[in-house]
């Protein structure tokens, strides 16, 4: 055991656990320790509906890398969708309408139009499914990943294969000097670990309701969305409040979300509320996936996925793991 590299992954959200899983698959001989102060339903990942629909402003360091992250992520989730493990991992397919009264632009998405099986303009008849006055619309087939299932299932899998999960807050990278390599997948926590002023929270709030009759996702104007999940629960959203750190539930946001969603899909009026959730999207342009040596410690950063971290976790994690493996091989080849 002693000649195996010791690798820490800081963060147990969708990014950290995906990095740990891919790392374990790529390196047969290594000791992986996931360190996090929040797991499962305490993470931002748990708040997300997890739909695969990147905002068109989602950005890696270049357009080519952005597209690679998206394409590889899609293929990763789509491959899971074809396996019997999909329900346990929380991966499901989802047909989606996006409607707008004002703006044709929002119904288009250059990042996925050529990737998902169907992406097309809505017909005149389909536009009548939107709220009164709907002028523009698109239909597309996509998928979603429920972190409620994905996080605990993935954590169990990596532990079965030898990884350790540790509960605790990392105050600085100096405290990890006994590791050969560290992956920084701390989401918003990276702001403090790296003193990164480019990482900004975009506050979100959602309502989870019971509405098993909703089988498709719907998007409307003003960041309104209705995204069904696996067990009859539907996520209603949303808000995007830039630079807000407020994790408290806001009844005004909830009322506005409910009103907008009911305009989009009136049969939601009777849906019972299961829970209200708030999360801070870790927004950064570009998303940071790169190596850094910090006081002799090899660190690979993988954070800043904003509102799109569930869907893009695999593509970014693949790059982070490749960087990490090369980083490790560059100096301690004998240990691998
Ligand atoms: C309302 C809302 C809706 C969303 N909808 C979608 C969607 O539909 N599709 C989509 O793809 N994305 C969506 N997102 C975005 C998505 O949730 C995030 O991009 C994603 O969860 C980021 O994952 P992460 O692993 O980087 O961060 P997190 O899930 O926040 O995990 C960070 C981890 O790092 C740990 N950590 C942080 N600092 C430290 C430290 N110093 N020491 C130890 N541990 C530390 C935390 O404890 C935690 O385990 C949504 C977000 C919100 C808020």
Image (tube, helix red, strand yellow):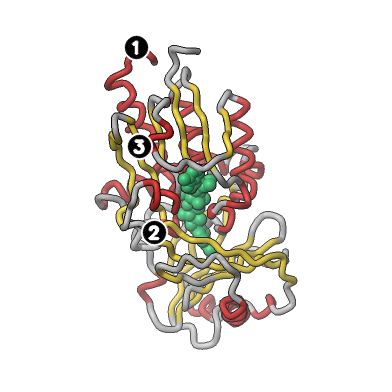
Which one is nearer the viewer's eye here, 312 or 285?
285
- Contact between labelled residues 1 and 2, with CB atoms less than 8 Å apart: no
Q: Is residue 291 above or below residue 280?
A: above
Give the x, y percent position of residue 261: 59, 77
Q: Label 2 to label 1, Cα distance in Å?
A: 38 Å
Q: Residue 110 — which label?
A: none
Left or right for 126, reference 7: right
* Residue plotted at (38% across, 52% down): 191
Which one is nearer the viewer's eye here, 187 or 27?
187
Q: Residue 283 — which label?
A: 2
Give the mark, 2 or 1, whose residue is nearer the N terminus. 2
Q: Is residue 185 above or below residue 204?
A: above
- State the residue position of label 3: 300
Residue labelled 2 has its Cβ within 8 Å of some atom of ligand 1: no
Q: Is residue 209 above or below residue 14?
A: below
Give the x, y percent position of residue 18: 49, 39
* Residue plotted at (41% across, 69% down): 242
| Crowdedness near tag 1: few (<14), some (14–19) or many (≥20) residues, C-alpha within 10 Å | few
* Residue plotted at (57% across, 47% down): 38
| Crowdedness near tag 2: few (<14), some (14–19) or many (≥20) residues, C-alpha within 10 Å | many
- State the residue position of label 1: 334
Give the x, y percent position of residue 237: 56, 70
Give the mark, 3 or 2, whose residue is nearer the N terminus. 2
Can residue 278 be seen at all in this image of the molecule? yes
Rendering quarter of residue 160: top right
């Amino acid at each position: 055991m002693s000649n195996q590299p010791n690798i820490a992954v800081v963060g147990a959200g969708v990014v950290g656990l995906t990095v740990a899983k891919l790392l374990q698959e790529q390196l047969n001989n290594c000791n992986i320790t996931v360190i996090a102060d929040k797991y499962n339903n305490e993470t931002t990942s748990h708040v997300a509906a997890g739909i695969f629909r990147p905002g068109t402003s989602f950005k890696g360091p270049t357009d080519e890398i952005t597209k690679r992250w998206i394409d590889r992520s899609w293929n990763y989730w789509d491959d899971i969708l074809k396996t019997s493990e999909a329900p346990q991992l929380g991966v499901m397919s989802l047909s989606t309408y996006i409607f707008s009264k004002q703006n044709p632009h929002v119904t288009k998405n250059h990042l996925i139009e050529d990737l998902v099986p169907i992406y097309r303009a809505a017909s005149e008849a389909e536009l009548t499914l939107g709220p009164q006055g709907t002028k523009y619309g698109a239909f597309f087939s996509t998928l979603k990943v429920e972190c409620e299932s994905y996080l605990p299932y993935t954590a169990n899998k990596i532990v079965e294969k030898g990884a350790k999960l540790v509960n605790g807050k990392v105050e600085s990278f100096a405290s990890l000097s006994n590791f050969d390599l560290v992956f920084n997948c701390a989401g918003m926590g990276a702001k403090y670990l790296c003193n990164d002023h480019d990482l900004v929270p975009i506050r979100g709030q959602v309502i989870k309701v019971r509405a098993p009759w909703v089988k498709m996702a719907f998007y409307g104007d003003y960041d309104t969305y209705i995204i069904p999940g696996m067990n009859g629960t539907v996520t209603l959203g949303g808000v995007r409040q830039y630079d807000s750190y407020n994790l408290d539930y806001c009844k005004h946001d909830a009322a506005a979300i409910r009103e907008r969603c009911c305009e989009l899909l009136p049969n939601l009026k009777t849906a019972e509320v299961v829970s209200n959730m708030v999360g801070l999207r870790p927004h950064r342009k570009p998303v940071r996936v790169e190596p850094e040596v910090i006081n002799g410690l090899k660190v690979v950063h993988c954070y800043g996925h904003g509102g799109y971290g569930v869907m893009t976790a695999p593509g970014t994690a693949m790059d982070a793991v490749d960087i990490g493996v090369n980083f490790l091989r560059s100096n301690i080849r004998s240990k691998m």
